[in-house]
């Protein structure tokens, strides 16, 4: 039986994650997993993600962002649960 609970997570990715297609990679993976939310570059060079969906899909997103696209080099991933979450419907790249 699948878990249909909706959860939300915030992720902060550090390393060589800007200028390497990381946001497009995250959006593609999030849409594949049926997640809603957003991804954006942060001024400190990290990438921030907020995603909502079922727990298994959120866990898979966290796993794939630890690898990232080929040109990325992920050094650290901070993850925390969010009380609320992004609205349903789509996953966007924020600027």
Image (cartoon, rainbow, N blue to C red):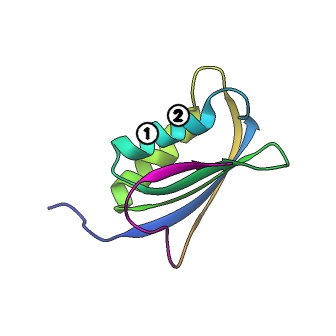
Q: As drawn, is 64 to the left or to the right of 11?
A: left
Is residue 3 highlighted in magenta?
A: no
Disc 2 target residue: 25
Q: Are marks 1 and 2 in contact (CB under 8 Å)?
A: yes
Give the image quarter of residue 4.
bottom left
Q: Residues within 10 Å of mark 2 (few under 14, many from 20)?
A: some
Is residue 89 highlighted in magenta?
A: yes
Element at label 1 = helix
In the image shown, does 48 or 89 lie closer to the viewer?
Answer: 89
Q: What span is colored magenta in the figure?
A: 84-95
Residue at (35%, 46%) from the top-left corner? 33
* Vertical order, 2 against 16 (above or below): below
Q: Position of residue 76 (x, y in %)?
A: 71, 44
Residue at (53%, 79%) from the top-left corner? 83
Element at label 2 = helix
Give the alpha-carbon distance from disc 1 to disc 2, as whole Å.
6 Å
Q: Position of residue 37 (x, y in %)?
A: 49, 58
In the image shown, does 34 or 5 lie closer to the viewer?
Answer: 34
Q: Position of residue 12 (x, y in %)?
A: 68, 53
Disc 1 target residue: 29
């Amino acid at each position: 039986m699948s878990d249909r609970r909706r959860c939300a997570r915030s992720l902060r990715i550090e390393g060589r994650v800007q200028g390497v297609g990381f946001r497009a990679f995250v959006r593609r993976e999030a849409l594949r997993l049926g997640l809603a939310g957003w991804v954006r570059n942060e001024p400190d060079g990290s990438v921030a993600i907020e995603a909502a969906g079922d727990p298994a899909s959120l866990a898979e997103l966290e796993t794939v962002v630890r690898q990232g696209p080929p040109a990325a080099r992920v050094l650290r991933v901070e993850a925390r649960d969010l009380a609320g979450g992004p609205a349903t419907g789509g996953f966007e790249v924020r600027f």
